Image: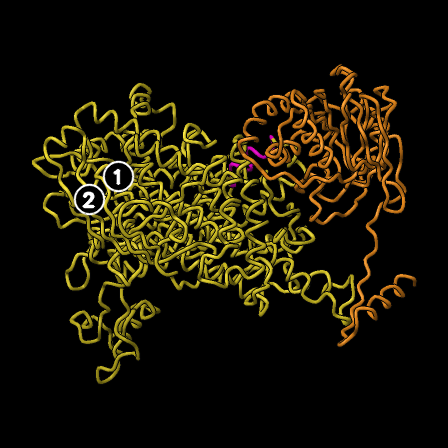
Amino acid sequence: MATTTSTSLPTLKTIPGDEIRQLLWRFEDRYDLAMLVQSVRAVARGPVARLVASGGRLSHDWTPEKDALLPEYDAAGITAAYMSPEEGGFLEGPKNFAMALIAFELAWVDAGAATCSLAQHLALSPIHERGTPEQQQRYMSLAAPAPGRKTFRGAFCLTEPIPYVGVETGMLGGRVRVAYWPTEEEMAAGKEPILEVSKRGRFITNMGFANFVTAAVDTDDERIKTSCMVILEETDEGTYDRGTPTKKLVHQLSSTSDPVFNMKVPASRIIGGYRIEDGKVVPNHDHSSVIEAVFRRTRVGVGLMTSSKLLSAIEPLIRYHRDRFRGSGAVTPGTPRFELGLQQKQDVTHRLLEIWAAGEASASLGFTTARLFDELDPLEKTKTAILAAHGIGGGMAEFKALKKRQVEAIEFLDMQDHLESLRPKARYQALAEDVVVQYVILDATANVLCPATKLWNTGYGSHMMREAVSLMGGYGITEDCPGFLSYKWMDTQLEATYEGPEAVQRRQMSVTMTNPVFLAQFRNWIHEMRRVASHDPGTGACTLASAMKLWTWTLDHLQLAKDANGTKLYQSNRQGVTFPMADALCWLLASRAQILDVERLAAEGPKNPALEDGLDGTVQFLRDLCHMQAARAAGEVARICTELVYGYLSHPSWTEPGCGACLSQNDLVSMEALVPGASGFSDETVGEGGVHETKAGPCAVHPGLNDFAKLRAKLEACMTGFQLAKDRAGDSLTKVMIPAALDYPQ
Amino acid sequence: MPYQIIVCGGLAPDPLQTLEPVPGAASPGLKNEMMLPGVLDPWASHALYEAANLAKQHPGSTVRLVSLAPKAKLQQVLMTVAQKLPFELMALDGANNGFSDANETGKALGEAIAKLDPPMENLLVFGGWESATRGSGAVMQIVAERLGIADVFLAVDEIKVEEGGSFLVKERVEGGKHMVSRCSAPPAVLAWATGNLAEPPNHPQTGMANMRVIMPSLQKATPTAVGSGMSFASASLPKQVRETRIVKDTSAAEIAREIAEWLKQ
């Protein structure tokens, strides 16, 4: 056996199924979403998987076989899931969580398919988030599949100066100019200015078949006040050149090319509309504000693609490990080698558990964030209406107005952290019902969770996906590897880059994580984890709380401290400080989300009779994964914080004045004569002729950092038991029942 | 003529799962059966697809699925089935698996259908001839007896309605042939083989419409105890034998001959 434990705790009986996932990710009451999952899954594991298996990924071109997937997406409701029922969709309410589920299910088989679906929604997002009612009605309806007409498909075009590929909204390529300015009479008759849009795109997804493009463009025309986003249709006057396929190495089931546009469109194509002021076209939204609203939502789905791959790797890996020696004449049925294969040894089980734990944590973080956006969306609309009623119409005025409400938001969070009986009820209730205050809280949280999901899920996920491939041995890097693991591994690199690479996410987090509202929330979360630990100590929640405490201490310290040269440590340009702190926070957020999800499963699971048989073992196993992940997170946080707290101090040297305190051999002899044994307490000594010990200098001592040292020591002790949890989970892994065969391609 | 089509259908574990019989208190069961993902029994699924197809051809017809299964498992399965075609649901909440007594199952289904008091003049009762869960092939006949329906067709692959209300039924018989019968009018019980229809694709909009009706029905599922009138001496998986030999340049005929010889051993 791979592990030996003397415990009699229940073990995992089967791989967690839909009932478990619905409870973990909190949609067990949403049959609309449960059906969507099944529908998307059938497409993913059917036509998509068959195309991957038949070599569909081995071409940069948008082939007829790839194109044939689009009607499959339409029929399965994937395309219409983004629309509201009045636009031709079938899901009520916000769609962030639904989109996240779609991305997760498609990426279980192939992330290129997920990107293809996501890019359609990405193209529509600017219109959905900031478009005029007329724009929303037209494009959302046309993009909803309907019998008897072609589905209108879109692409989103934002490219920094070519030939590079990426998201840098400040370095926009493409221009919009006024091509024709109507006369006053024409204006009075309703004629609009005509704009000329010139743009070259790079690595634009869906471009092989898009009927319209939402393009970000800057302007050098004095008759247009700001940059904006415009909608270009393939039938508009001018050049709509789809360009050559991008020679990308990943996500080959999505269409990407480098298009060229030179088109004339009416000004009403400016997303969000415009007004004429002083003879100028003034877009109601510049391109940055539109994109910000879009990316903060769609990035979540990208993060979940990588989570999905990690979890999809579990079953094929267990099967491979167990079956490794079967079929060899030398290994007979019934022997441990036959039954357990590679699982006889601890290495494969433990390494697989780390992949599994990372997959669970990243999925929990991603779905938590998606749900948060579903909560945020209606609040945002109400907030905008309330502010508008007070004459505040967005931009800096709105920013200032919301900032003023931060005090109340923090007050509410402080009260929330107290026992209900100790809260001033009336005040608490008033703040709980204040939409703007609640918006400020959720917005501050979302501004951290979204980039954290994108950054950690894809970055660390990519690393763990490589582990998954390596656990499959040479089989892992073949085209016919079950579960397409090597494709998935390569694809993770694009996910880490798509919609803003790691640096963009870290930069955003380095700002948003210092928002006092978020930090107030974060302090509450520390207490929340302690409470969880008090009734479920096996989750690692206490370890996590200690790590969270260490992180907040470090952040406070770094914001005030200076380095050995007297330069402030926490500042926007000092990414060597701010970025690692963002990384550390991601570990904490993911682990917290994972623990809370498992706690919910433990609480709600017993209500489902279908889970009666194996719930205890499943919860125990998932808790052990939580414990492992919390300890891993704590280790990362401890490392990062230690590096930052001590790393910017200069190490003392033997030549420094402080070295005068070193004791000579004679001093030590004298001390011994006075107090026997006292010489043992001296740190540094100097030998005859001023010779010191062979080392860099006197050992660094920082009395001012004693609090940090205590927190770190406490954290390390908090890791007690996590390896036992790993052994226990490893034991489960050798016993869990898996399906007889992988369920894709079907 | 519009028909009232009632389809009997239970659950089966997803066929890709590892299915291992284990002894239970009253009868054997499958290891971790409740934890395994389920599907609507494939034979019953064919019956349901045929029912929907027939209903589509005869406007005004209704399709009702009567299912004896654990309610929570059934709900999960319906997330897929309900997307495929429009139907109503009558759920009987009870343990039912491949080791249930066919007589007790038939009795429960028959009584449930009788309670609906369907008009006999346009009633068609569909179900699977067999089951993916060790079917006895007897349930639909027992249902027919309970409902007092004399026209029972087994291993049905096709139904074709004629002008005047009679219908032709194709039943599988020995030797890969079909027997064609003409039934003058409903009521009739048809236990389906595979039929001729492909599995309908998922259609979430249909699912949404279905579930608005199905969910309340599911909540009102009648608790139904299925008694066991038999005992099992043992239950085990068929033995698997794997013999591997690597050879080169062997003709298909030679391979076929070797396999045939091996089978005869």
- Disc 1 marks which amino acid? Ile
Please indicate, yes or no, whether residue A571 appears anywhere in the rendered image.
yes
Chain on which label 1 sits: A
B49 relative to A557 in the view: left or right: right
Residue A433, percent across and down? 32, 23
Along the viewing direction, whichever of A559 and A349 lies nearer the viewer: A349
User: In the drawing, what numbered circle is on residue A271?
Assistant: 1
Q: Residue at x 25, y 44 (%)?
A: A229
Of the two numbered discs 1 and 2 in the rendering, the one whose residue sits closer to the viewer: 2
Q: Colour of chain B?
A: orange
User: How was this image coloured?
Assistant: by chain
Quadrant in the picture for the N terminus of chain B:
top right
- Determine whether the residue tagged by mark 2 lies in a helix, strand or loop: strand
Q: Which residues are magenta?
A: A598-607
Please indicate, yes or no, whether residue A543 appears anywhere in the rendered image.
no
Cα gap from disc 1 to disc 2, whole angstroms: 13 Å
A306 relative to B103 in the view: left or right: left
Along the viewing direction, whichever of A391 and B126 lies nearer the viewer: B126
Local crowd size for mark 2, using a 10 Å CA cut-off: few (<14), some (14–19), many (≥20): many
Residue B19, percent across and down? 74, 47
Number of callouts in the render? 2
Local crowd size for mark 1, using a 10 Å CA cut-off: few (<14), some (14–19), many (≥20): many
- Within the image, what quadrant is residue A529 found in? top left
Q: Residue at x 20, y 47 (%)?
A: A196
Q: Residue at x 53, y 43 (%)?
A: A40
Magenta: main secondary structure equals helix
Residue A669, percent across and down? 29, 76
Residue A84, percent across and down? 42, 31
- Determine whether the residue tagged by mark 1 lies in a helix, strand or loop: loop
Mark nearer the N terminus (1 vs 2): 2
Q: Is residue A601 magenta?
A: yes
Q: Colour of chain A?
A: yellow
